[in-house]
Image (tube, grey):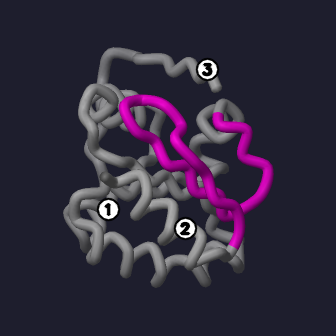
Amino acid sequence: MAVTFFDFGYADRFLQTESSNMLTLHSTAEWNAHFNALKETNKLMVIEFTASWCGPCKLMDPVVREFAAKYTDVEFIKVDVEELLELSQAFQVQQLPTFMLIKRGKVADKSVGIKKEELKKKIEEHRK
């Protein structure tokens, strides 16, 4: 899947959540800065596409926090589809929650819905 991102030449501060490998991004500039910094590494990024009104997303919040604590070598990124609509469209997000697993700048896998075991299996498979 070819996804094009725009770099506007500035980066706002990232909102750091309770885990150092868990970020919430609020702007395209934040996404571009973070994506560009990690795309050349072998580090797995798990992007959680969510929305404040999404009940299933709220059910997955503790699961994602648990995974972030367990898989400290993985970067977890939370994106609100209403704040970053362009990014959500670029990844063709049609259902929430959607988890995109990115490695070396490319989509390695994805998981859609409340599927804790499926997401765990995919993280373990791609973090190596």
Kindly identify which residue carries mark 2. Answer: 119
Q: Where is residue 126 in the image (x, y as percent from the top left)?
A: 41, 52
Which numbered marker is on residue 2?
A: 3
For label 3, the crowd category at 10 Å Cα-Cα, with few meaning under 14, some 14 to 19 and many 20 or more, is few
Marks 3 and 1 sit apart, C-alpha to C-alpha, by: 25 Å
Relative to 63, residue 41 above or below: above
The nearer-to-camera label among 3 and 1 is 3
For label 2, the crowd category at 10 Å Cα-Cα, with few meaning under 14, some 14 to 19 and many 20 or more, is many
Residue appearing at x 49%, y 49% in the figure: 101
Residue that extends furthest to the right in the rendered view of this protein: 94
Relative to 120, residue 112 above or below: above
Residue appearing at x 54%, y 37% in the figure: 107
Say what secondary structure mark 3 lies in. loop
Residue 101 shown in magenta: yes
> As shown in the figure, which amino acid type bears the numbered disc 3?
Ala
Residue appearing at x 77%, y 57% in the figure: 95
Residue appearing at x 32%, y 16% in the figure: 9
Marks 3 and 2 sit apart, C-alpha to C-alpha, by: 23 Å
Image quarter of residue 58 = bottom right
93 sits to left or right of 8: right
Kindly identify which residue carries mark 1. Answer: 22
> As shown in the figure, which amino acid type bears the numbered disc 1?
Met
Marks 2 and 1 sit apart, C-alpha to C-alpha, by: 16 Å
Image quarter of residue 65 = bottom left
First in sequence, mark 3 or 1: give its number.
Answer: 3
Q: Which of 73 and 19 is in front in this view?
A: 73
